[in-house]
Image (tube, helix red, strand yellow):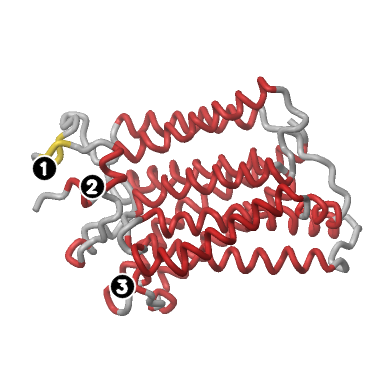
Amino acid sequence: MSADNQKGLALAVSSSLFIGASFIIKKKGLKRAGATGVRAGVGGYSYLYEPLWWAGMITMLVGEVANFTAYAFAPAVLVTPLGALSIIVSAALAHVVLKERLHTLGIVGCVLCIVGSTTIVLHAPMEQTIDSVEKVWGLATEPAFLLYTTAVVAVVLLLIFYYVPQCGHTHVLVYIAICSLMGSLSVMSVKALGIALKLTFQGQNQLIYPQTSVFAMVVVTCVLTQMNYLNKALDTFNTAVVSPIYYVMFTSLTILASAIMFKDWDQQSAAEIITELCGFVTILSGTFLLHATKDMGDSTNMGIYGGLPITTMSHRLSMAGHVKRPEDTKENEEIPLRRTESIRTP
């Protein structure tokens, strides 16, 4: 592994630690704000007055800065899948700090995430040499990536102006799709801006080029859109459902965007690419196993919670669109490893 990839790896891991912790803090802040003001899920911004939400936001920002820097050193194919580690951190904190029991199969899911991450790290492509922001701009304006960008913007606008008013509060995929699509563009812009700043600190000033400003504006626009709709998703639906779906969609779209723009796999063999994809699938399997078994608080239950059989993951996702009732606010106040509405007793 190259020195740059090692730096990117270290930054990506530290980013996951901060972001994983921030989910718990932000969720609690959103719930507290919703109890005294208009909830974010229905268009309110009372969480801006909640100190706990800001604490979670600051923690997330620290993680995002580390993640931002990681993209300047390592390819997105390496950095983005490591975001699964934040899910492990959240699960571990919920188990230790919140005393929410992690089932044995959930631990297996965590191990799968670690194994998949290790596989990707060991077979990650080398970061290509880019000596100016103009070269990045050239990659971003190639026909293939322009077509991808146009398609993303069109779909996002359709979701925001048509599907959000119609079914945004009942279908979790609407909010998450907006976050994920915009997220894939934000990562590409973050990587471009990170490269520009890295070259500037090395003595090659890239801030004089207008392309740097354009990438910065795209980053701000995409990140603000992401945060807005992610807050809506977290406040409207169970975080244990939002987290894995968001991770899968965001990571898949980011890897696709990076493959189109930066051509990460051009210098790799078919065997290396397949190995990386297997690592990614392993992470996905671990992520879904972790969340599919979070209701099994004790191995003695093995599928029974409160006298009801545990539902399958497919059924849980099909029921994810149900909005939480007001009386559920306190019970579902914390992040992961709690039962969802699909298995609640009447």
Mark 3 surroundings: few (<14), some (14-19) or many (≥20) residues within 10 A: many
Q: Circle 1: is it few (<14), some (14-19), or many (20+) Cα within 10 Å? A: few
Rendered residue at 35%/54% (across/down): 239
Q: Quadrant of the N terminus?
A: top right
Q: Is residue 95 above or below residue 200?
A: above
Res 111 quadrant in image: top left
Q: The residue tagged with tag 1: helix, strand or loop?
A: loop
Instruction: Look at the numbered disc 2 and give the secondary structure of its residue.
Output: loop
Q: Quadrant of residue 65?
A: bottom right
The residue sitting at 38% across, 47% down in the picture is 93
Image point 24% across, 61% down: which residue?
Answer: 324
In the image, 277 versus 93, the foreground residue is 277
Residue 277 percent across, percent down from the top left: 57, 29
Tell me whether the residue at label 2 lies in contact with that at label 1, contact meaning CB atoms closer than 8 angstroms. Answer: yes
Spatial separation of the CA atoms under disc 2 and disc 1: 10 Å
Pointer 2 or 1: first along the chain: 1
CA distance separating discs 3 and 1:
28 Å
In the image, what residue type sits under mark 2?
A: Arg
Residue type (three-letter) at the residue carrying disc 3: Gly
Q: Earlier in the sequence, mark 3 or mark 2?
A: 3
Residue 85 on image: x %, y %: 50, 41
Determine which residue is flagged by label 3: 34
Q: Mark 2 points at which residue?
A: 339
Give the image quarter of residue 176. bottom left
x then y, percent, for residue 39? 33, 73
Left or right: 82 in relation to 331: right
Asked if residue 192 is positioned above or below residue 99 in the image, the reply reads: below
Q: Position of residue 42 (x, y in %)?
A: 34, 73
